[in-house]
Every structure is written in structure tokens, then in C-alpha cells.
Image (cartoon, rainbow, N blue to C red):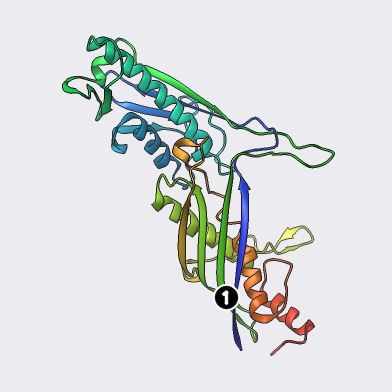
Amino acid sequence: MKKRGKGIGVSFYGTGYGNGFPDVSNAIAEVDKKGNVTIYVGATEVGQGAKTVLIQIAAEVLGLKVDDIEIVCEDTSKTPDSGTAAASRQTYNTGNAVKKAADGLKRELLKRAKDYLKLNTILGLKMKDKRIYLDSFPQKSVCFKELVQNEKIKVKGTFKAKTTKIDDETGQGAPYYPYTFNCYGVEVEVDTQTGVVEVIRGVCAQDVGIAINPELIEGQIDGGFAMGVGYGIMENIDCINGRIINNKLSKYLIPTALDMPDLEKIIIEDPEPTAPFGAKGIGEPVIIPVVPAILNAVYDAIGVRLYEIPITPEKILKALKEEGREQ
């Protein structure tokens, strides 16, 4: 017999290393003699879209298209340290460093434009498409490359995250900042004869601060949900006497596209005032609520509470038998 059930899971997640550990990101914004803009940052791209988002942040500050900016990363001979691609910190932490560097470069360019155009203030100066112009008289303008003299203009931005060590005695404190929140719901179908659990529908409400790139956010939710499904009902290291039995991808079961249900993704925007344009990172948070939502849905379906993951068919059948609910 196949039985259906629904469940929800909620979570909050602290961004960055936390607990008083130094959490610093650096970035450099540069304009060369040809007027080209480059961002140097030690952020590693692991498929999460960091390069795209960091370029978007710099482009927004400098009034440029994303194609007008080159980003150099993952090369320690050229880039400053931006910390690891971990703890959902690149958009928030390194994004802040990039924004600071771009803001500094913008101030320097405006200062040089004021002198070049023989103005008495930078007020009224606008920046767009590598040109700086007077808003009230656009014909009075200058290109980026005309403002670069003998050397490239380079400005460094540094961001230090707020993090506090918790009290060792009480375990109390505020180790992270900021936090990300979410609530996911799933519907499952449990075959009580085989013990197989199928996730047939998911709804994901995800706090993102501000969505700098909604398409990438939806991709993160898709990926995180798939990892959660694997964590909850499939992935299991089979270890006997210290030896991993399923030590090959051909033997280690993970979800495929066929295991993914239709997902309804709800992006919740609530700007974080300390973040670059209000945006938070969501790398790990999109995984966390999936498993509790699945476990609650299975309980709703068969009336048996399971406490150990992954909930494999064998565990489902054993639990049903122990509760006298086998079919």
C-alpha cells in the first residue's frame, strides 16, 4: 500500500566562520590605462555563482554592464586573501569587500574627474559606461582611460565580519552575524510493502536578504534540495571494520534528476543592512530543512517516527514491523 504524508522543516543559519574566529575578506578594484575594470579577489568559484554575483556588485557600484568587468580569482599570485568558499560567506563577506573596493575606486575616479573637468565639487557627477559626466550638462564628460596617468588606479577593500566567541561556561552568546531563515515543506509517498520513500513535491521559502541574482538563487535551492533528499533517504557510508564498502560512485547512491520532485521556490526578500545591497549567502541553508521536512512527512504518512538517517527501505520496513503496522 502506498501512503502519502506532508511535513515541514524550518531552520536558521549563521553566516561565516563564527564564534570569534577571524573572518576577513579582501578585494581589489582596478582601472588600467585602457579604461578596463578588473576585480581581483581570492574567492573560489565552486559552482555557486560567486564570480557572477561579485561582478554584479561591482558593476552596480560603478555604473557598468557585467560584461565590462573582468574578475581574477583563484590565483594567489595576483589576488588578496578572501577566505574560503565555505560557511555561505562569499556573497555577504567577500561581496562586502568587493563593494568597498568598488566604492573606493568610484570615489577616486570622481575626484580625478572633478579636477580634469575643472569643477569645484564632485556633486552632480554621474558614472555610466566607463564615462563620468555632469548630470546637468552631459556634454561635459571624461572617459575612465583619460583619468589614468602613468599607473593603474588600484583600490583595496577589506571587510571584517562581526563574530563573537560564545561563553565557554554557559554556551550562550551571539557567535554569528547575520542569520538566514527558511521554511521548506514536502509531500512524500511511502510504499509500505517495499519501504521505498518518494518525495513527490516540495515548497521552499528562503530568506535571501535581497536577491542579487534570482536565477542563481533558484539554482542553489534546486541543488540544496537534491543534497537534502540524498542526505535523508539515500546516502549512507557502509563501513565494516573501518573499511568503506561502497567506496565508488558506482556503489554510492545519490539522487539523480529523476529523484527530484517539482519544486515551488519562494524567494523572501528582507534587506540585511550590513550586507552588500542587502544580500545574504544561502549555500548551506538550502540543505538544512529538507531532511526534517521529509522525516515529518514520513511520520504523517505511516504514523511511525524515525530518528536515524538515511531512512532506507530496510529501516522503514523494520520500523513498521516493530510498530505492528507492516502490510
Relative to 192, 81 lies left or right: left
Q: What residue lies at 53% left-to-right and 62% top-to-bottom?
A: 226
Label 1 element class: strand
Coordinates of residue 216 in the picture (x, y in percent): 42, 50
Residue 235 seen from this side: no
Coordinates of residue 112 in the picture (x, y in percent): 30, 13
Mark 1 highlights which residue? Answer: 188
Q: Amino acid at mark 1?
A: Val
Residue 126 occupies quadrant: top left
Relative to 174, 111 lies left or right: left
Q: Say which quadrant the C terminus sits in.
A: bottom right
Most extreme residue toward the right is 169
Measured along the vertical axis of the image, is residue 254 above or below residue 298?
Answer: above
Coordinates of residue 164 in the picture (x, y in percent): 69, 33
Measured along the vertical axis of the image, is residue 295 above or below residue 42?
Answer: below
Measured along the vertical axis of the image, is residue 121 above or below residue 282?
Answer: above
Coordinates of residue 212 in the picture (x, y in percent): 41, 44
Q: What residue lies at 61% left-to-right and 78% top-to-bottom?
A: 196
Residue 191 occupies quadrant: bottom right
